Image (tube, grey):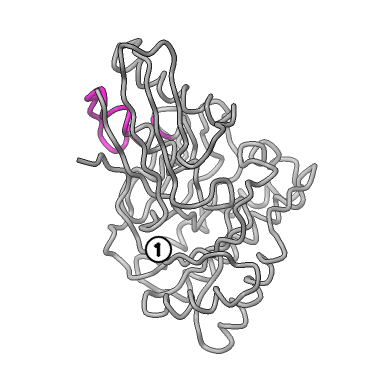
Amino acid sequence: MKATAKSPANIAFIKYWGKTDLKTRIPKNNSISMCLSDMFSVCTVEFRKDLKKDEVEFKGEKIVKKRELERIIKTLDRVRKLGKTSLRARVTTENNFPKATGIASSASGLSAVTVAALGALNIKMNTKELSSLARLASGTAGRSIPDGFVEWVKGSEETESYSKQIFPVDWWEICDVVAVVTKKMKKVSSTEGHKLAETSPFYKERLKGMEKKIIRIKKAMRERNFSKFGRIVEDEALNMHAICMTSQPSIIYWSETTVKIIKEVMRWREEDLESYFTIDAGPSVHVICEKKQAQKIKKRLLKVKGVERAVVNNPSTGARLLA
């Protein structure tokens, strides 16, 4: 009983920061995201009778961190319960980008584990059920299940917090050019950051404006109004990081290179090269642009001191079993 799944990372245009329930990962607000074509995880899960315990391997890494191991085993346990089996599993997983640097590695990694485990036990689910299950492993993992442009509906209970497609993959020719600025894992995990969100004096104000902001960005996406969309995306990134920086204790995910890229993107707009930045919980910067400008943006990012790699991502399909 073996299956392999591939799942994309995703970038949030409207961020999820703060949870209503820590255990079930129900968020304080809806979020809007896009699945990424060229940043992904591939995971193989094999349930075997000869194993006495679960075995996990991250390709290219000698040691699996305790917290990562625990999250994978909990994911397997949920699937085992659904499949009514006690078989242990061999898990092999690999990312094509650095973990814990602001590129949603837990989203792609744990959604891939979830889909592969279900596939290995031949358990069928619809998108709503699958995204809700993946959310229990990592909040953002649920957003990597549907195709294209996605909304994560916060819901008020476990089964009603799920992700759904709002626009298909081919709706809009925009790109996310990801500037990878480090391979080092961030010191403060997103999970810890969520716990601190409400300690910021500005957090309540953030939540007050969230519903209107989501209406505005969905309208801009529906109309394919790139300028309006980009301004909302950039403002939202600064808003979320203002919460991080003013939490107690303060969290600063940015590096010196992060700030350089922010300033460069603003300068490029003055030169009529329209693009907008967004940043998740890490130092890597996502530069959102129209597809026709993507290669030019990539070349410019690679000239910024401190940028190790730049990857152009189109909108992508969500998690899939591989043949």
- In screen coordinates, is 11 left or right of 237? left
Q: Residue at x 49, y 38 (%)?
A: 139
Instruction: Classify residue 44 by image quadrant.
Output: top left
Please provide percent x and percent y for residue 117: 33, 27
Boundaries of the magenta span: 116-134
Q: Quadrant of the C terminus?
A: top left
Residue denoted by label 1:
313
Task: Identify the residue at the far bottom of this view.
Answer: 271
Instruction: Classify residue 260 by image quadrant.
Output: bottom right
- The 10 Å Cα crowd at callout 1, few under 14, some 14 to 19, many 20 or more, is many
Instruction: Tell me the kind of residue under disc 1.
Output: Asn
Q: Main secondary structure of the magenta part?
A: helix
Q: Residue at x 74, y 48 (%)?
A: 251
Q: Quadrant of the N terminus?
A: top left
Is 317 part of what is drawn in magenta? no
294, 150: nearer the viewer: 294
Please provide percent x and percent y for residue 63: 57, 32
